[in-house]
Image (cartoon, helix red, strand yellow):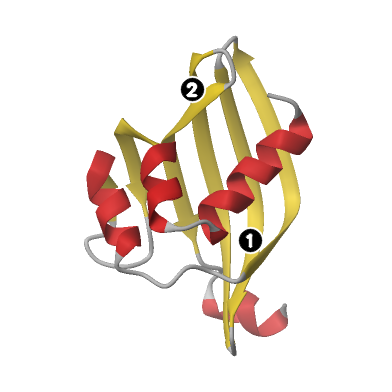
Amino acid sequence: MDDERVWQFEESLWTGDAEHYRASIDDESVMVVPAKPFVVTGMQAAEAVSDTPRWQSVAFSNQQIMRPQEGLIVIGYTAEASRGEERYVAHCTSTYRRLAHEEWRVVQHQQTPPPVAEAREG
């Protein structure tokens, strides 16, 4: 997957519907998010997202892409998402594994909101 497609895929995880999210998450995934239960696995993540309103838009900065081996992509970035008047900022990582040609699934994702002092400065 080229860099542009990586970022399009990641954006779709923030803005796509619950069905798209469910289809993009590997059954063997682990996620850390800033809301209870904080650590979720596999379809727990997809179920949690299906009950959450999707973001209308998201912008990425501080983007990094690593390819430690064939069929594995690790990304890091800062996300700034919005829906209506609500805004959300987090430092994130995601890891994708390739299942087949052009078929990728998320196996790891984490979101860390900036510390309060950093959020006020930014």
Mark 1 vs mark 2: give the one in front.
2
The local crowd at label 2, few if under 14, some if 14 to 19, many if 20 or more residues have their Cα within 10 Å, is some
Q: Is residue 52 left or right of residue 119?
A: left
Question: How far across and how far down the image is residue 6, in percent?
Answer: 67, 36
Q: Earlier in the sequence, mark 1 or mark 2?
A: 1
Q: Quick one: 54 or 66, which is closer to the camera?
A: 54
Q: Amino acid at mark 1?
A: Ala
Asked whether the beta carbons under mark 1 and mark 2 sit within 8 Å of each other, the answer is: no
List the residue tagged with mark 1.
79
Q: Secondary structure at mark 2?
A: strand
Q: Quadrant of the N terminus?
A: top right
Q: Residue at x 51, y 33 (%)?
A: 95
Q: Answer few, some or many: residues within 10 Å of disc 1's Cα (few below 14, many 20 plus, some between 14 and 19).
A: many
Q: Is residue 5 above or below residue 87?
A: above
Q: Is residue 103 left or right of residue 53?
A: right
Q: CA distance from mark 1 to mark 2?
A: 21 Å
Question: The disc labelled 2 sits on which kind of residue?
Answer: Arg
Q: Quadrant of residue 4?
A: top right
Instruction: Name the residue: 33% across, 35% down.
Output: 29
Q: How many marks?
A: 2
Say which residue appears at 61% left-offset and 42% top-offset.
Answer: 9
Residue 41: x and y in percent read: 25, 42
From the image, tell me which residue sits under label 2.
97
Tag shown at residue 95: none
Residue 51 to residue 91: above or below: below
Q: Is residue 56 above or below residue 30?
A: below
The picture places residue 39, in percent across and down from the top left corner, at 27, 51
Q: In the picture, residue 105 is in which quadrant?
A: top left
**The C terminus sits in image quarter:** bottom right
What residue is shown at x 36% (from left), y 70% (from top)? 52
Residue 78 in the image: state x and y as whole percent.
65, 57
Relative to the observer, which residue lies in front, 97 or 66? 97
